[in-house]
């Protein structure tokens, strides 16, 4: 019984330690695998077979905007909020 509790506690601590460690994931500055993905031709159904129902198929629109400038090593990741600081207010004059 005691071993079971110790194992459960050790497992829980390990999960917490791993989930809180950002160094295990890749950086947002490294190119992602999906960035090099290309389009493929539409599905061609051989003669004599039924075409699949594509009414609810996902349509990816063409990108018509210019590509943003590359991010620098010092830039924050886009999924992180920007730093927020305010200038100290001057002391009221007497």
Image (cartoon, grey):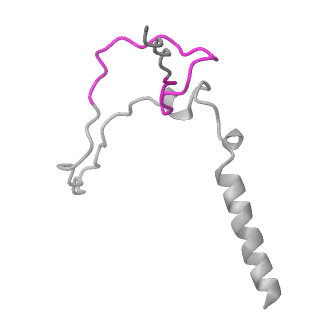
Q: How many marks?
A: 0
Name above or below for residue 82 compared with residue 48.
above
Q: Determine the residue positioned at 49% across, 25% down.
A: 82
x and y, in percent, of residue 25 in the image: 65, 41
Q: Determine the residue positioned at 20% across, 50% down.
A: 56
Q: Where, quadrant-wise, is the C terminus in this rendering?
A: top left
x and y, in percent, of residue 44 in the image: 29, 43
Q: Determine the residue positioned at 58% across, 26% down.
A: 31
x and y, in percent, of residue 71 in the image: 54, 16
Question: Is residue 59 shown in magenta?
Answer: no
Q: Residue furthest left?
A: 55
Q: Determine the residue positioned at 57% across, 18% down.
A: 75
x and y, in percent, of residue 59 in the image: 25, 37
Identify which residue, 90 or 46, lies in the foreground.
90
Q: Residue furthest front?
A: 94
Residue 6 left/right relative to 87: right
Name above or below for residue 51 compared with residue 62.
below
Q: Where, quadrant-wise, is the N terminus in this rendering?
A: bottom right
């Amino acid at each position: 019984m005691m071993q079971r509790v110790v194992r459960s506690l050790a497992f829980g601590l390990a999960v917490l330690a791993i989930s809180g460690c950002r160094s295990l994931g890749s950086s947002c500055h490294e190119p992602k695998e999906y960035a090099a993905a290309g389009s493929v031709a539409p599905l061609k159904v051989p003669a004599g077979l039924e075409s699949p129902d594509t009414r609810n198929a996902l349509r990816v629109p063409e990108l018509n905007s210019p590509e943003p400038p590359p991010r620098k090593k010092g830039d924050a990741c886009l999924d992180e909020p920007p730093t927020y600081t305010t200038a100290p207010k001057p002391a009221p004059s007497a």
